[in-house]
Amino acid sequence: MTSKEQGELRLLMTMLERARSWERMTGSTPEASRVAEGSALAGDDRKSDPYQVSHAAWHALTVAVDNLHCLYLVTKGYQKDEKSIQLVMHVYSPYTLLRASLENAARAVWMLSPNDRKERIARRLQIEAGNAKASDLAHHRMGAQPTRTLEQRMNQLRSIARDAGIIESRIKRVTYQEIVEAAGEETVGNELMLILWQCASAMAHGDAWAMISLSDREVLGEATSRILNLRVTASTSMLVTSVQASVIMIDRGFKLFDMRRVKHY
C-alpha cells in the first residue's frame, strides 16, 4: 500500500470517529433533540402538528448517523502501528451504508435549511405525502386494510397546508434526487453532491459502470475472446471522498437543527 493510501486510511479513520460521538449523542442524550419554546422549530411544530418538522429532521439525522456508525464498526478492528494501517475494505457494501447516510442527512438539511417557515413546513408535508403513498401501497400489496385511506391522509396534509398558508398543490411526493441536489447547495455544491450520491447508489446496486469506474482494477492474465480477467479492489480515494460527503452533510444537519431549536429573543 502506498504512502498516499496510508494517508487516506488515516483520514478515513478520523472521519469515522465522528460517527461514534454522534451515535452517543443521538442514542443517549435527550437534551440534544429538545426544542425550546420560542424557537423557530417550536413554531414549525405547532403549525405542522401532528407531523412535526423537528421530529422528522431529528429522525433523519439519527438514521444517517446509524448507517455511518455501522461503517465505523466495520472498520473498528483495523490494525494500526506507527508506520501503517491494515484494514479489510469491502468493494460494494460501504456504499450501501453511505447512500443511506447521505440521503437521510440530506433530507434533514433540505427540511431545515429554508429561512422561511412556510417552506420548511411545506417540505415536511411533502415528506409525509411520500410516506403516506408508500404506506398505502405496502398495505394493499400485503392484502391489508390501512386505518385511513390514502385520500383521507392526503386531505389532512392539505388541510395543514391551507392553515399554514401553503398552496395545496405543493403537497406531493419529492424525489431523493431533488432533496440531495437542494441539500448539496447548502454544503459542497449541488453537482458534486449529486455525483457522489449517484456513485454511492450505483455501487449499492452493483451497477457495472460503477464497479469499473470507481474501483481499483488489476488485469490478471491475457484477454481472450475480448474478455478481461480482472481483480477488483476497493478504492481508498473514492471511499474517503464518499465518507467525507456524508460527514459534511450530517454536520450541516446538526448545525441547522441546533440553530433552529434555540429560543430567539
Image (spheres, helix red, strand yellow):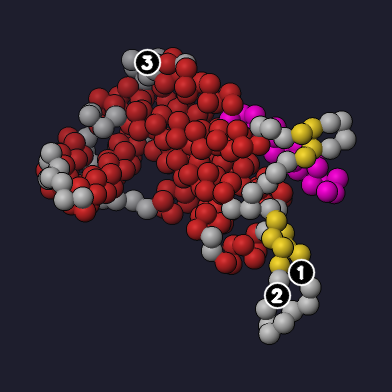
Residue carrying label 2: 228
- Which residue is at 13% across, 39% downward? 147
> Any magenta on residue 4?
yes
Residue carrying label 1: 219
Type of amino acid under label 2: Leu
Between tags 2 and 3, which lies in front? 2
Q: Quick check: marks 3 and 1 in contact, CB under 8 Å?
A: no
- Which residue is at 22% across, 29% downward? 50
Between tags 3 and 1, which lies in front? 1
Task: Give the structural element (helix, strand or loop) at label 1.
Answer: strand
- Residue 231 as seen in the image, left or right of residue 91: right
Examine the image and state in which quarter residue 232 appears: bottom right
Examine the image and state in which quarter residue 195 appears: bottom right
- Identify the magenta region: 1-19
- Which residue is at 45% across, 40% downward? 104
Q: Nearer the viewer, residue 124 or 152?
A: 152
Number of the label disc, if any, that sits on residue 36: 3
Image position of 129 with respect to 54: above or below: below
